Amino acid sequence: MPKYPPNRLPLSVPKKYFELRRGGLKGAAAARHVGVSTSAGSLWFIKAGRMLLPDKPIDERYLTQDDRITIAEGLLAGRTASAIAEEIAKHPSTVYREISRGRGPTGIYNPWWSHNQAILRRRRPKPEKLRANPKLRHFINDKLKERWSPQQITRHLARTEPGQPAMNACPETIYRALYNGLLDKRTARLRTRRTRRKKQRRGIPIKNAIPRMRPVHTRPREADERRRAGHWEGDLILGKAQASAIGTLVDRATRYVRLIHLPNGWKAPQIRDALVEQTTDLPTSLRRTLTWDQGRELYLHEQIEDLTGFRIYFCDPHSPWQRGTNENTNGLLREYFPKGTSLTCYTARDLAQVERQLNERPRRVLGDRTPAEAMRRWSRHLTYR
């Protein structure tokens, strides 16, 4: 038997005791095996609350029983939470939270009690909080009706109902209640009008990404400085339900607009064929560069370069300002092609008429000259289609 009380034993001893108990050994036999009295083993068992086994393997991103024992040993040795986190390869915030909620009824961090509580929290299914609390559900429903966001509701509840877990709800709880129909669909809705969760791809590599993209940061300086015509920005404007589209090209220097008719769709092969066919009338000197976003419609950009002579560059993800001239032009085009309408009814002749109107409209940025006048400075042979 040990010469010092069981609460002074190294943590490896109770760890071995609980491993034996989980292996099916009785309490008295496990206590004898680790060299403590039966009452000492019983005391460990009682302090742990109960001994639970997870119903399925615990993912490695969560804390294990060994991780919690390492945290307890680190606290006994006087190490900081950051040092312990580095030792078990977890974020310091994870260790801080674990220490805070793992103290148990005694106020001292107990790795076995904390591990059992973690297993209890993992058990599913759990009762839905808003289903079991009509008062909270009605409050959230009213605030959503007033166009509050889930984050605003969460912060408001935390401020007005401190220390009342039953009257607090995290944003995820509110989102789930919305998507699962626990709230009134007629009045409670998100400002985005979204009724289902948007798929997320965080940390997942996107399959079939556009190969060998040339970043916009490597574009020639003369294109950035708008010193010469022939450097274009391109994009699509989409029709109702994304079932139709029109391609838009605008020259950075002259603001000259060219619309691409897409009667056969706007997948990569159709975009390739339309760009090749509908830019052949441009002089070679006016087919220098083309800047596009990272839309999959330009997956065949290398073929487009070979067939047209454009050198294609791609903007960074979610950076529309890198082709701001085109964004501004698309805003002007929405006067002719409103959002939420089908674009299939417009013919190539209709697009040519819209081109003409925009290109013959004076622009302040050009000193009140028209894009057509500015473009004629660079090409005497360019005519409307």
Image (spheres, rainbow, N blue to C red):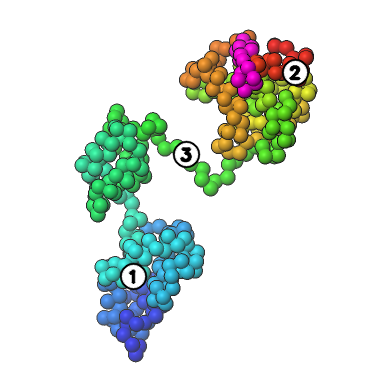
Give the mark nearest the N terminus, 2 or 3.
Answer: 3
Judging by the rendered image, the residue that carries numbered circle 2 is 377
For residue 363: magenta? yes
Above-or-below relation of 74 to 344: below
Judging by the rendered image, the residue that carries numbered circle 1 is 109
Q: Of helix, strand and loop, which one carries label 3?
A: loop
Residue 264 x, y percent position in the rendering: 62, 18
Q: Of helix, strand and loop, which one carries label 1?
A: loop
Residue in view at x 62 percent, y 23 percent:
365
| Three-letter code for the amino acid on which mark 2 is drawn | Arg
Residues under labels 2 and 3: Cα distance? 49 Å
Residue in view at x 61 percent, y 12 percent:
357
Give the mark nearest the N terminus, 2 or 1.
Answer: 1
Q: Nearer the viewer, residue 211 or 171?
A: 171
Q: Nearer the viewer, residue 114 or 141?
A: 141
| Three-letter code for the amino acid on which mark 1 is drawn | Tyr
